Image (spheres, helix red, strand yellow):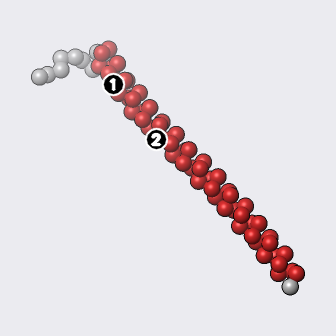
Amino acid sequence: MTDERGTNDLERKIEDLTKQKEYLQRQCRKAAQAIVNLEVDKARLRRDLERLHEEYNNYKIMKEVK
């Protein structure tokens, strides 16, 4: 079976653009999920940093008291 449409055929262009749009939508969804995951990691790391900073300050205070 041969495709007799030329490269300038509008149906072919519509199909190609539809495929491209669907691919880009999938990639955008993946990127959005990656961003959400990074935001969650960022929040977790920020909490850990604040906890460690507080522990360090408490350690310094205890060391000064002795």
Q: How far apart are marks 1 and 2 (CA)?
A: 21 Å
Residue 58 placement (x, y as % from top left): 80, 72
Q: Quadrant of the N terminus?
A: top left
Amino acid type shown at disc 1: Asp
- Give the left or right position of residue 8, taking residue 42 as reference: left
Q: In this view, does 22 lie above or below 5?
A: below
| Residue picked out by circle 2 | 30
Q: What's the residue at 83%, 78% (across, down)?
A: 62
Residue 22 at what x, y percent from top left?
Answer: 39, 29
Q: Which of marks 1 and 2 is nearer the N terminus?
A: 1
Q: Residue at x 81, y 76 (%)?
A: 60
**Residue pictured at 60% horizontal, 48% vertical:** 39
Q: Mark 1 points at which residue?
A: 16
Q: Where is residue 36 drawn, in percent x and y?
A: 56, 44
* Residue farthest top in this picture: 10
**Label 2, residues with CA under 10 Å away: few <14, some 14-19, many ≥20:** few
The location of residue 65, given as percent across then percent down, is 88, 81
Q: Which mark is residue 41?
A: none
User: Secondary structure under badge 1?
Assistant: helix
Task: Determine the residue located farthest toward the left in the rendered image.
Answer: 1
User: In the image, what residue occupies the spot 14% across and 22% down?
Assistant: 2
